[in-house]
Image (cartoon, rainbow, N blue to C red):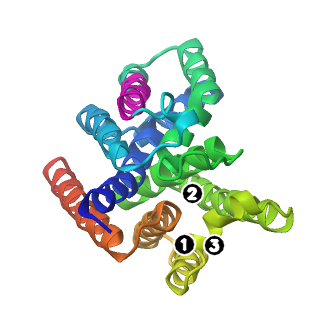
Amino acid sequence: MSIAPVLAAAWRVLFLTASAPLIGGVLLAAIGRVTGARWTDALAPPAATRLVIVGAAVLGFAQMATPLPPHLALWMNPGLVGVRAVIACGMLAFAGVRLAGGASVTFAAVMLALYAAFVTPVAMDWLLGEVPGHTVSSAGMMLFVEQIAGACALVLVLGRGDARFRADMAKLMVAAALGLGYLIFMDYLILWFGNLPSRVGFYVVRSSPWGAVAVWMALIAGLATPVALLRLRPGRSGERAAGVAVLIALFVTNGWWVGGGVAVWLSAAAGLALIAAGVGWWSRAHG
């Protein structure tokens, strides 16, 4: 495997994992504004959200490493993929700034409606750009629950908000992680037992021994571990450990979903380690 596809897949894994908590924070703040909950503590700093826009642009360059079938040559053109990603992330970053400043309920509702309308084509670009032509009807919902799980996990890791807020985020985090696992399994179940050989190859490639290990790692880290920690270690330490476990599970899930082998995992992990170090520095510097 040449270096370009490895780096492209690694960036996709890195972008999906790192952007999820930041975008999910905007969604949580909007949901809280509509429902009357005070969830603005889920918002990341505006500078961090703006970095997602840069990552989205690079996602367009990463798309250049994937051969495109003729019927998708225009829609999946790397330039258009990058432009769509930048526009989506730019709008979410703008919404985050408005929500932090006390945007109206109407603004939050319109923002959520637009997200719901466009999340599926965005998810097709982000989650399935490595396999153009393979369709997953629940891709939009997969991306949404991953972003919610990531945002809740980051809240717990950073210890943001009061105890009641973190308790809500812990429960929502487990529910979102369970939802992601359910959606992936149901897609697999429908394809495998629905006798759809033209689409089963996606899961055949991911059914190697390492793929099976990744699935079990994601289930243990994303579901069993946080539930056990939140039950057995109530308080900040248990919440922080549960959040870390879910973030690890999201990384493993994205690595398995995107595929590409050990080199992809190692490259993406190195990038996430740098991001985690930056987050740690920021949290210490800003209390």
What secondary structure is the stretch in magenta mostly built from? Answer: helix
Q: Residue 47 lies in magenta, yes or no?
A: no
- In which quadrant of the rendered view does residue 245 lie? bottom left
Q: Which residue is mark 3?
A: 204
Frontmost of labels 3 and 1 is: 3
Segment tinted magenta in the rendering: 78-93
> In this orientation, does residue 182 appear?
no
Frontmost of labels 2 and 3 is: 3
* Helix, strand or loop under label 3: helix
Q: Position of residue 188 (x, y in %)?
A: 73, 64
> In this orientation, does residue 188 appear?
yes
Q: Which residue is mark 2?
A: 173
Front residue (pair 273, 12): 12
Q: Residue at x 24, y 63 (%)?
A: 3
* Marks 2 and 1, how far apart at CA: 9 Å
| Label at residue 226 | 1
- In which quadrant of the rendered view does residue 87 lie? top left
Q: Position of residue 54 (x, y in %)?
A: 26, 36
The amino acid marked with disc number 1 is: Pro
Q: Position of residue 153 (x, y in %)?
A: 46, 58
Q: Position of residue 152 (x, y in %)?
A: 49, 52
Question: Image check: 89 left or right of 30?
Answer: left
The amino acid marked with disc number 2 is: Met
Task: Count residues near mark 3 (Cα–Cα under 10 Å), then give few for <14, some for 14-19, many for 20+.
Answer: few
Answer whether labels 2 and 1 touch (C-beta < 8 Å).
yes
Q: Which comes sooner in the sequence, label 2 or label 1?
A: 2
The amino acid marked with disc number 3 is: Val
Q: Residue at x 37, y 61 (%)?
A: 157
Front residue (pair 32, 27): 27
